[in-house]
Image (spheres, coloured by chain):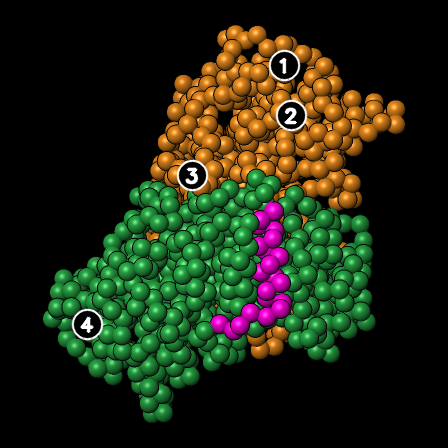
Chain colours: A orange, B green
Amino acid sequence: MSKFSFPILTAEEAAALINDGATVGFSGFTPAGAAKVVPSAMAKRAAELHSAGKPWRIGVITGASTGASLDGALASADAIAWRTPYQSNDVLRKSINSGRTVYFDMHLSQLQPWLRSGFLGKIDWAVIEVCDIEADGSVVLTTSVGAANTLARLAGKVILELNTKHPTFLRGLHDIYEPADPPARGPIPLVNVRDRIGLTVVKLDPARIAGVVLNDADDEVKGFDETTDVTRAIGANVARFLAAERKAGRLPDGLPFQSGVGNIANAVIAAMAQNQELPAFDLYSEVIQDGVVSLIEQGRINFASGTSLTVSPGVLRRVFADWANYKDKLVLRPQEISNSPELVRRLGIIAINTALELDIGGNVNSTHVLGRQMMNGIGGSGDFTRNAHLSIYTCPSIQKNGAISTIVPFVSHLDHSEHSVQVVATEHGVADLRGKDPHGRAQAIIENCVDPQYRDLLHAYVKSCGETHAFCNPDKSFIFHQAFQRHKDMRKAAELL
Amino acid sequence: MSKFSFPILTAEEAAALINDGATVGFSGFTPAGAAKVVPSAMAKRAAELHSAGKPWRIGVITGASTGASLDGALASADAIAWRTPYQSNDVLRKSINSGRTVYFDMHLSQLQPWLRSGFLGKIDWAVIEVCDIEADGSVVLTTSVGAANTLARLAGKVILELNTKHPTFLRGLHDIYEPADPPARGPIPLVNVRDRIGLTVVKLDPARIAGVVLNDADDEVKGFDETTDVTRAIGANVARFLAAERKAGRLPDGLPFQSGVGNIANAVIAAMAQNQELPAFDLYSEVIQDGVVSLIEQGRINFASGTSLTVSPGVLRRVFADWANYKDKLVLRPQEISNSPELVRRLGIIAINTALELDIGGNVNSTHVLGRQMMNGIGGSGDFTRNAHLSIYTCPSIQKNGAISTIVPFVSHLDHSEHSVQVVATEHGVADLRGKDPHGRAQAIIENCVDPQYRDLLHAYVKSCGETHAFCNPDKSFIFHQAFQRHKDMRKAAELL
């Protein structure tokens, strides 16, 4: 049990320490392990100050997205002046898209090096959720690592949220390794998904611990939707493709998988587990979701390495209740390690991510709706896809009953260029883009992946480009988006051809 | 001297061995070290066969671009069915852009892993330039490594071009390291630019060496243009920025530099060398050009690691004449090592590359003119920029006397997203994009980097996007390109606003 002499503070006392204009780093990668009671108290304080005509807005750095008590509460109080590196909260998204909050989108593996390099300025405070604290300042994190170790180490002062809901036996779940910075950096000594290369605790300078706030709130993780015919078909197509690659000798056994977050990713992992031509596999990924826990139980996933255990409260209780079984099958690492380009290429990861929008050249938009409104952020998708042994992008071919084709002539924002996208899968089929030029890619994507009602339109767009290598027609590239803006239906693009 | 018993063939005899439809890997990364006499003889044979109504077209894989005797001759004979991973030849470019040659653009660090994974099919033949051959099949490469070691190892049969122009004392210039493939790969054991981790020779199975063709041709490397006021101003701006970063403590001494190929890159390296606030530095780069040799002579570059020594014949003779001085200051590595994401991030490289086109969001087009015509290819730019400690893109603000603004509302092809571009420099100034959202990036780029005659136009474009996070206006994104297509002058975009 915790034996420490740091002052116990109320959330309100802690929040009162932090001044307008501060840069604050919070633990949390997804709602898992996110600070909760202190940011909520900060939001309350901000609202009160604002009512009194006083300013209180801060810079917020986390591992990735967080929960309602952090991004949600602070954004609702208009207390976030700037934010990096990722978010997924409705209220904050509005603040970003209206220009009220400055949001800097970045590859998640780059956050910790950038913090150390001083590219994002000085961190005044860190607020870190922990499940155990020692007198020497060593702390045990909870359900995520993210960037918490670096934020806590670099911050001027640290507030610890001691969450008593999380058992202290989580000590050992984390593998905290922080590399030296160039020019003094050596190889990251991880060669197997299961390797442990660091400490089980984050070691903090006790003199910088301003206090401890008690907390017993669950992680604000929502469960995922049930699979649908479309997501099951996407999953089955990916699994069938992978089984064929294995048969052709291009997919050695033992390569770990990375899977994005969300309903499609869950369906793909489930389909891979169901496909008996694929052996049980390891994950070297970012976020460990509910579905992974079930597949560990079924013996289809052998081991999962991530930076967060983002499971719903019921599933988390199941894991805790059977901890003897899980503790050797899970590890959480800092995001610069879970998402490390060095390790992704060394391990030969098969990366499976979801596109918001995709074009016939094989380019992916992961972030911006109609090229304008930030959805969440690029997250770790670029860390994995760029360096993967094989990078697969999935999406449903249509949305809104066909009024939107996910596959367009030209993406309205580009996060992953053609060079990072080897395979595209929708519910209709799979396009293998390796070795193909833009003509070959467009043919494969249109014929295998696009919804039939959009195929002729896209062929007509290709034709409109004339004799060319790649398909940019400045007069027509955005006819799908223009049609949607004018008629709420991309099928009307025919009128603009 | 060479002591071997492999058959000596004429170039014509060697060329006659290779059948229509073959996949052929050639040595060469830039014209340096490229096969010369055999591809020329192949081109002659193709032309003869074509005259007789017979087919002869092959797939061509190299390290990167090559010389006139390879891409030029084969493309002129319409003998290249498909090509990867990079090229820069006029005739081949036409064949690609007319759709006659299938061209697959890829990150150069990925070529060797992809060859080993079988993603590009079987390699029937390799034609490799060497300067020394031993009886056991060990060979010494010449002025480049590129992918030659992997191409030669994987090919069904190998033809060696023994170039007697290159002295055998080049043994020791090369550091040939080929990593194991996942899941058996460990860390690449390089921690310093100077480290040697491999062999000085490529070891080939003697049974697969079909013959040796003699050759004494120079590398077909052209010198670069003299610097101009514009390139000197760009270089000075980059150097001043770097000196300020160093002063601010964000640029530790000892981080190596990577520099792209071309006149601007040469001017930037020269300006860095002239700036006395910057210490002498190391290069960990791809292509070692003429300018680097001069700066080694001046003591401003201490060491240069690359994959090719692409210097003009006169400079190469200077280097050979003073080899005792140069041999400890140069090393050539396979392109999967020179461009390795693992090593780029470990070493903390400062990457300086040139944009063909750049937009106000900070996105870079490195490849396609007006989004349609392939120029050369993405090359190694993505390998370096994505993983660099700091990634700088340079370009002249205008071209064709102002009829083209290099900086546009929206790039017509995107190779490097905003996430990979931290600093932009033109002759007008520098935009530091770190931590800025799209509004901040657009302001910094327009005010600091855009030519004054285009600033109001770009501000007006931003305004046309309305309240938004990012600047995609489907009706207006390509007004610069449309104006150029219609009037050969982007300034006429005002009419389309």
Q: Position of residue B198 (x, y in %)?
A: 27, 51
Going by the numbered disc 1, the residue's amino acid type is Gly
Q: Position of residue B256 (x, y in %)?
A: 45, 50
The answer to whether mark 4 and mark 2 are in CB contact below 8 A is: no
Residue that label 3 marks: A185
> Which of pointers 3 and 4 indicates the residue nearer the eye?
3
> Which of pointers 4 and 2 indicates the residue nearer the eye?
2
The answer to whether mark 3 and mark 4 are in CB contact below 8 A is: no
Going by the numbered disc 4, the residue's amino acid type is Ala
- Label 3 – label 4 distance at C-alpha: 44 Å
Q: Residues within 10 Å of mark 3 (few under 14, many from 20)?
A: some
Q: Which residues are magenta?
A: B224-244
Which quadrant holds residue B206? bottom left
Q: Residue furthest bottom?
A: B52
Residue that label 4 marks: B210
Q: Which subunit holds the residue at mark 4?
A: B
For mark 1, give the secondary structure. Answer: strand
